Amino acid sequence: MEKIISFSRKCAEKNDPWHRFDHLEMAASNAAMIAEKEGADREVCEVAALLHDICKAEPGDHGTSGAEKAKGFLLSIGLGPGFADRVAEAIHFHDKESESRSPEGAVVWDADKLYILTPKGFITRMAPYWITRLGEQEGVEKAVYEYYFFRERINTKTARGIVERHSELMGRIIAELGKK
Ligand SMILES: [Fe+2]
Ligand SMILES: [Fe+2]
């Protein structure tokens, strides 16, 4: 695990401030928690979450390139091809819609999106990320759009429960933003 963490940390240095190692670390701890509750393979989920954005700074589809890079790395440190493939599959689909996610892919998707669907994550990560890219008005609109987009696409009962618990406050925040 130590080797995987330091690889993740090193790759994430090139990412924008919202996708650095702290994001990967948080996704991994969410993934472990959700995996345990949902009965998915905790190790696959945790490793995939730790590595899911290692190609975020590169042009093109970072799920596809990240999956390949992660697989190569995991094989190079002696992990088995079966494990590496399962991790790669979850990374590959973390940024794509899919009708047939593996249970681990479903957990990693949720673990990646969970924080931005809570008030703290929405305000400190989702909104600033889009405002930086699109300006204040359009950035806020995009962040609100993304909130509802990802909320509808949460896979697991565990993550849905957490999102639900925050939904009333999120509704008030969004209503307030609409008045500005
Ligand atoms: Fe990503
Ligand atoms: Fe991510």
Image (tube, rainbow, N blue to C red):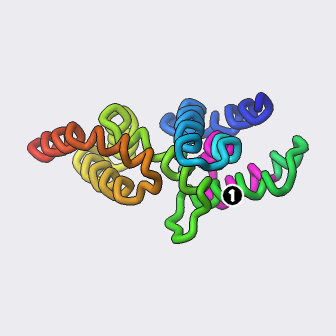
User: What x and y, as percent, mark residue 76?
Assistant: 89, 46
Q: Looking at the image, can residue 59 be seen?
A: no
* Residue placed furthest toward the left: 179
Residue at the image point whose x is 55% and y is 30% from the top: 22
Label count reads: 1
- Is residue 43 magenta-colored? no
Badge 1 element: helix
Q: Main secondary structure of the magenta part?
A: helix
Q: Nearer the viewer, residue 46 or 92?
A: 46
User: What x and y, as percent, mark residue 129?
Assistant: 40, 42
Q: Nearer the viewer, residue 101 or 136?
A: 101
Q: Is residue 18 left or right of residue 161?
A: right
Point out the image quarter for the N terminus: top right
Q: Which residues are magenta?
A: 47-71
Residue at the image point whose x is 59% and y is 61% from the top: 93
Residue at the image point whose x is 63% and y is 52% from the top: 58
User: What x and y, as percent, mark residue 97?
Assistant: 50, 66
Q: Which residue is mark 1?
A: 65
Q: Nearer the viewer, residue 152 or 59?
A: 152
Point out the image quarter for the C terminus: top left
User: What x and y, as percent, mark residue 179?
Assistant: 9, 44
Q: Residues within 10 Å of mark 1 (few under 14, many from 20)?
A: many
